[in-house]
Amino acid sequence: MKTKILITTLLLITLTGCNKQSASEPHNTAVAAKFVQSDKKIGEFLGQLDSPETSQEARVQILCKDFPAEYKSEYMPALLQLEPKQYTQSKLLAELKSALDYYKNKFEIKC
């Protein structure tokens, strides 16, 4: 139950980040576009993980490689540039770990 709340919180943070990007300064436009694109990819990954049609092999690929790589290399740096006072690297990494742990436990996946 706690993990579902955590996942919901992670998604809400994502949506909040999307809403706040429109108030960003003009010089952050490229960063905001990068964030929106990465946010969309992460949303697609989460949708695939939640889909009953997704194979176990695809879930392993997403959880062990694609999702963490996208989050760490694109999403997190963009969010930290857009909202440096609201987020820290350690906080975002902890949220990533919680989300990954939830899905790994749910689907019994070990990376």
Image (cartoon, rainbow, N blue to C red):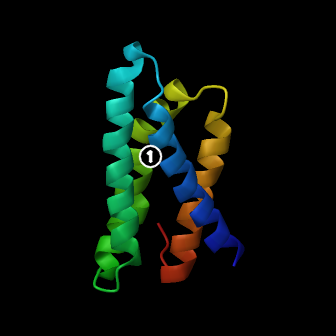
Q: Quadrant of residue 28?
A: top left
Q: Amino acid at mark 1?
A: Tyr
Residue identifier under label 1: 71
**The N terminus lies in which quarter of the figure?**
bottom right
Q: Quadrant of residue 43?
A: bottom left
Compared with residue 56, is residue 63 higher up or lower down, i.e. above or below? above
Residue in view at x 64 percent, y 35 percent: 87
Q: Secondary structure at mark 1?
A: helix
Compared with residue 38, is residue 27 higher up or lower down, i.e. above or below? above
Q: Position of residue 73 (x, y in %)?
A: 41, 37
Horizontally, residue 49 falls left or right of residue 84, namely left
Pick whichever, 8 or 96, lies toward us: 8
- Please identify the residue farthest to the front as the structure is shown: 23
Residue in view at x 45 percent, y 33 percent: 21
Compared with residue 100, is residue 75 higher up or lower down, i.e. above or below? above
Q: Position of residue 10 (x, y in %)?
A: 57, 56
Horizontally, residue 95 falls left or right of residue 45, namely right
Q: Does residue 88 appear in this view? A: yes
Horizontally, residue 102 falls left or right of residue 54, namely right
Residue in view at x 58 percent, y 71 percent: 102
Q: Position of residue 42 (x, y in %)?
A: 38, 54
